[in-house]
Image (cartoon, rainbow, N blue to C red):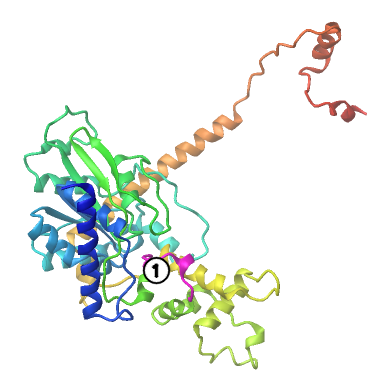
């Protein structure tokens, strides 16, 4: 079959797939999902070449990012192995991570679940950062302290017992005819590229917080016999609320035409006024006691946030509520406004999950990784400071000879180095 025939068949089948979806559901009921055939083709190619499918889910919204249809398709139709990676576990408490892990393992019998974080945090760091919404400290892009690479490779070794070379990630191995391929799939902005960098231990693929940054699948060799395949993010069809999709990072915030509904969705489920320390602007208050009993709307929250941050329009110098709304949504996507979901029964059994062995083990690993990362950062800062304080030895310059070369020698002896700045002599007057 030629390439053109394959592409025509794919186009026809994809069109039937879309028609079947819209036949059973109205467009207003459906969430934002991928309609680009080329993006779906990237997923199909990755599923074809991969031996183990690794699906990533943001730990804040794992039920949203996990696709049961994809899980059934990989296991039953493709007859391949499936691993679920709960990524960004540093953004929530360890007991919540353990609860979600046990939930998926109990619901799906043949599912292997691994916890991962490219930037682990100790408990003291997590408690310190709570409430610091406007903290400007950014993560250092160091991928050599990730939590979860060994657990992921151990899960792959368990599924493929005959290919034991996967355990020797940091050792040299001889080329093997049997090539093991791990395909990383999932929604946009769940951290697939960051996970690959964490596995390799350095930056090998580009990362961005903008959804859809990866356009084509990328292949990286972890060892001569283990290959990693990074698939572009793809949003599957679902009946999830569109506002939740925006807050979970599945839709680019810069393309949201009306962000105020999403801000209201967030404010109805999280105390934004208290978290952002908002004060109602004076022109919105009818009297002095108005603010005490004021019922905040999404527009009022954006007005107050624009007032606090100084967001003003260029021409009329009015509060830029659109920019303020986008700023609030970005805080939620970046994890500075903590919004996440609980598994069923988590609140009633919170103490049980706190004392769970997996919770204690995860907290201990994050503490160790965080401590080693902080020690490396201190060593780097000390080394950089020493380089700055180290006296630089000045090498004698070779001056070009000219007609009056004797004058240049005298100048060099009296004043040291000769400046190339023609206006340097004016400083002596």
**Which residue does the numbered mark 1 point to in the structure image?**
338
Residue nearer the viewer, 413 or 41: 41
Residue nearer the viewer, 191 or 396: 191
233 horizontally vs 293: left or right: left
- Dot 1 surroundings within 10 Å: few (below 14), some, or many (20 or more)? some
Quadrant where the image shows the C terminus? top right
337 horizontally vs 424: left or right: left
Identify the residue shown where x is 50% and y is 82%. Answer: 298
Give SS at disc 1: loop
270 horizontally vs 315: left or right: left
From what the image shows, is residue 133 above or below residue 425?
below
Identify the residue shown where x is 28% and y is 42%. Answer: 219
Tell me if I can see residue 46 in this picture: yes
Q: Quadrant of residue 168?
A: top left
Q: Give residue 390's position: percent from left, percent from top.
A: 59, 27
Would residue 257 be counted in the magenta stretch?
A: yes
Q: Give residue 136's position: percent from left, percent from top.
A: 53, 57
Would residue 360 be counted in the magenta stretch?
A: no
Overall secondary structure of the magenta section: loop
Q: Quadrant of residue 68?
A: bottom left
Q: Give residue 330's position: percent from left, percent from top.
A: 46, 66
Residue nearer the viewer, 218 or 345: 218
Residue nearer the viewer, 276 or 403: 403
Identify the residue shown where x is 30% and y is 72%. Answer: 341
Q: Which residues are magenta?
A: 247-258
Q: Quadrant of residue 281?
A: bottom right
From what the image shows, is residue 213 above or below residue 271?
above
From what the image shows, is residue 210 above or below residue 223?
below
Q: Give residue 123's position: percent from left, percent from top.
A: 35, 58
């Amino acid at each position: 079959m030629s390439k053109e025939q394959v592409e025509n068949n794919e186009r026809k089948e994809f069109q039937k797939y879309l028609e079947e979806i819209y036949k059973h559901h109205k467009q207003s009921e459906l969430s934002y999902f991928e309609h680009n055939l080329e993006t779906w083709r990237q997923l199909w190619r990755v599923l074809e070449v991969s031996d183990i499918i690794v699906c990533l889910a943001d730990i804040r919204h794992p039920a949203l990012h996990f696709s049961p249809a994809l899980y059934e398709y990989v296991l039953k139709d493709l007859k391949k192995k499936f691993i679920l990676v709960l990524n960004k576990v540093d953004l929530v408490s360890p007991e919540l991570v353990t609860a979600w892990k046990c939930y998926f393992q109990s619901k799906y019998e043949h599912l292997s679940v691994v916890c991962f974080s490219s930037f682990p945090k100790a408990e003291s760091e997590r408690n310190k950062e709570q409430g610091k919404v406007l903290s400007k400290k950014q993560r250092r892009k160091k991928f050599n302290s990730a939590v979860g690479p060994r657990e992921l490779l151990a899960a792959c070794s368990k599924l493929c017992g005959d290919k034991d070379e996967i355990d020797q990630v940091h050792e040299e191995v001889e080329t093997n005819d049997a090539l093991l391929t791990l395909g990383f799939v999932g929604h946009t902005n769940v951290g697939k590229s960051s996970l690959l960098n964490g596995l390799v231990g350095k930056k090998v693929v580009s990362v961005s917080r903008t959804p859809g940054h990866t356009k084509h699948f990328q292949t990286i060799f972890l060892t001569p016999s283990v290959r990693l395949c990074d698939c572009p993010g793809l949003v599957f069809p679902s009946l999830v609320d569109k506002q939740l999709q925006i807050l979970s990072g599945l839709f680019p915030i810069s393309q949201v035409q009306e962000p105020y509904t999403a801000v209201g969705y967030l404010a109805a489920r999280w105390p934004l006024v208290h978290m952002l320390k908002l004060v109602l602007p004076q022109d919105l208050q009818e009297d002095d006691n108005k603010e005490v009993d004021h019922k905040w709307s999404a527009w009022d929250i954006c007005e107050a946030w624009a007032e606090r941050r100084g967001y003003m329009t260029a021409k009329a110098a009015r509060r830029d509520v659109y920019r303020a709304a986008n700023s609030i949504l970005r805080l939620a996507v970046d994890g500075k406004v903590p919004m996440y979901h609980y598994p069923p029964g988590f609140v009633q059994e919170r103490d049980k999950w706190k004392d769970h062995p997996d919770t204690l083990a995860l907290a201990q690993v994050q503490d160790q990784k965080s401590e080693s990362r902080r020690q490396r950062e201190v060593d780097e800062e000390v080394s950089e400071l020493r380089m700055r304080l180290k006296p630089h030895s000045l090498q004698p310059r070779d001056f070009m000879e000219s007609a009056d070369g004797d004058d240049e020698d005298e100048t060099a002896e009296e004043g040291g180095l000769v400046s190339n700045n023609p206006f340097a002599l004016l400083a002596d007057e």
